[in-house]
Amino acid sequence: MESVAVYSDADATARHVLMADQARRIGPAPAAESYLNIPALIAAASAAGADAVHPGYGFLSERAEFARACEQAGLTFIGPPADVIERMGSKIAARALMVGAGVPVVPGATPSDQSDDGVVDAARTIGYPVLVKASAGGGGKGMRVVRDEAGSREAIGAARREALAAFGDGTLYLERLIERPRHVEVQVFADGAGRVAHLFERECSVQRRHQKIIEESPAPGLPPAVRQRMCEAAVAAARAAGYRNAGTIEFLVESAGGGAQFYFLEMNTRLQVEHAVTEAVTGTDLVRAQLDVAAGKPLPWSEGTLVQRGHAIECRVYAEDPAAGFLPQAGRLLLYREPGGPGVRVDSGVVEGDDIGVHYDPLLAKLIVHAETRDHARARAVAALRSFPVLGIRTNVPFLIAVLEHEAFAAGKVHTGFIERHLEELLHVPAAPAEALAAAAAITNASRMTGRDAGRPDPWEQLGGWGR
Amino acid sequence: MADSTLILRGQDGVEHDIAIGADGSVSVAGRTITVRALRAGELRAGDAVVWAAADDRTRWVFFNGQVYVFAVERPGARPRRGSGHAGSLAAPMPATVVKTLVSPGDRVRAGDVLVLLEAMKMELPVRAAADGVVQAVRCRAGELVQPGQDLIEMAAEGA
């Protein structure tokens, strides 16, 4: 199978473009004019003679309009049918469907009056603290916590603007905030003949700015009976949705008490960023399965044949400064070296010398490790991150190590407020050791000592990928 | 014998005097450490493997899972002034101005949002650090701003 990549002007020499068999330009750097531009994408796919379109996991991957445009252009959309995306993308419709299917849901509402006054009234009815979200959204965009009436108007305005900018739809949804919940999701897969299977759960509680940074499978300390009920609920949810292809049912799990009550949060009608965690523990290739199902083939596995083997952890490496409120960073990757070895997988979109811009999400790479037990996986992830130098731009690599080594994380005591609660300890940076200072002082001299670059005043010119 | 000397200032503000020998030895804090290049950017400093990179006046080091960033100071040079003068609010990173929420003469309170920026699809509110009066608005909606660029000029209340 040949692949055709699409790119904006900002990504003309990006890694995905270099790896693909063909690449087509779809517009200038701003996403609205390129990666969110449906006519440009359809035109590129048609011109390339493509049979099918994989929407990835950002941008238009959950836009029914795009799935529909693909079908109308005679392209197979690798994902669920457009009407299913539409239904599950609407928090109201999805919720109603789940209630009907007997899946537990969190108390909440979409105000019929979407004015500031209407939304404030609805928040008061549900009771503070309230989570304000984009009805069309995901990924933490357009999401705000409102703790009292005083802060509500500013938060509502900001949530609406972010929702509009990210999804082109400013409709807001409110729900009761469950404090210190765990975020556990179940991978589901369905084929065209109505077969539905789950591929167990992923624990995704370690988040900042409502975005996940560490995911793992199995979820630590989840009672087997709860896991089973959640997986069964996820299959029932996918069935009720008339689902096809890969999807994820997200649940909030109350960590308080031994009951571990869970609630349906939302369905992601696409492949997830963290799908590799599931691939590692189940020994599957979810993207290939997506292609198979889209081609009309049956699911390559049935539920009885799948097991969770060992433990997998994914760490998302972001260009961001955790010490500055996880502020996204832009700049050049002066040095970028990926780790390797047994049980270590790196999925990335950058190479050394790349300029990281402000146009897109600052995710640089995903490190996925697999080992026999959670402790072994944790140790393997730490070792890999210690061999993952990224310089020239701040990243969260040191922060990820601090999370993995934190005693509460080691004990499996995770919840969505984990980072906020332990932030000070996690941000601790030891004083610069003499070796670090010596290397910092020697770096220009030291490179000359290799002798390979004699006569070059700037040793960095020898690094690849800078010729533009 | 020292070939050259260097002052590196860490993010914590601490300055380190370093002497570099022609033989690849580096003297720092009373220790002499031999530094050898293994590959471009990958060094052995003493017994440790360290990655390092340089960029204008900044040195970056990855050691033991930590990143250290140092500013290169000329011997005797004074620390550089922070971006923007006192009483101004600067952009924290490259971003697009979504909108400005104040005008010259407006009285604002600490924590008020003065400018909304957007970068990587996230809104970043720029808030007043203290109570004061807006002197000038130095950006407009739609503008792409750079880190350190002044956005709002402020004067303390009653000044």
Image (cartoon, rainbow, N blue to C red):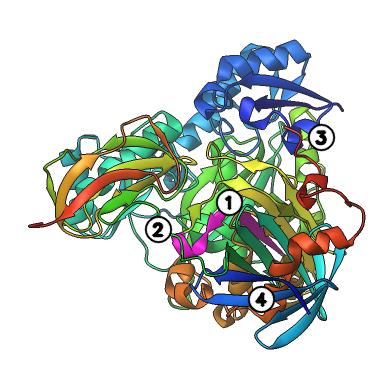
Q: Which residue is mark 2?
A: B82
The front one of B44 and A422 is B44
Q: Position of residue A8 (x, y in %)?
A: 63, 26
Say if B64 sits above or below B83 in the image. below
The residues bearing labels 4 and 1 have C-alpha atoms spaced at a distance of 60 Å
Q: Position of residue B82 (x, y in %)?
A: 40, 58
Tag 4 and tag 2, C-beta contact below 8 Å: no
Q: Secondary structure at mark 3?
A: helix
Q: Position of residue A421 (x, y in %)?
A: 43, 73
User: Mark 4 is on which residue type?
Assistant: Ile
Q: Secondary structure at mark 2?
A: loop
Outermost residue, bottom side: B30
Residue B18 numbered mark, or none: 4
Residue A247 numbered mark, or none: none
User: Mark 2 is on which residue type?
Assistant: Gly
Q: Which one is in front in this view, the residue at disc 4 or the one at disc 2?
A: 4
The residues bearing labels 2 and 1 have C-alpha atoms spaced at a distance of 53 Å
User: Mark 3 is on which residue type?
Assistant: Met
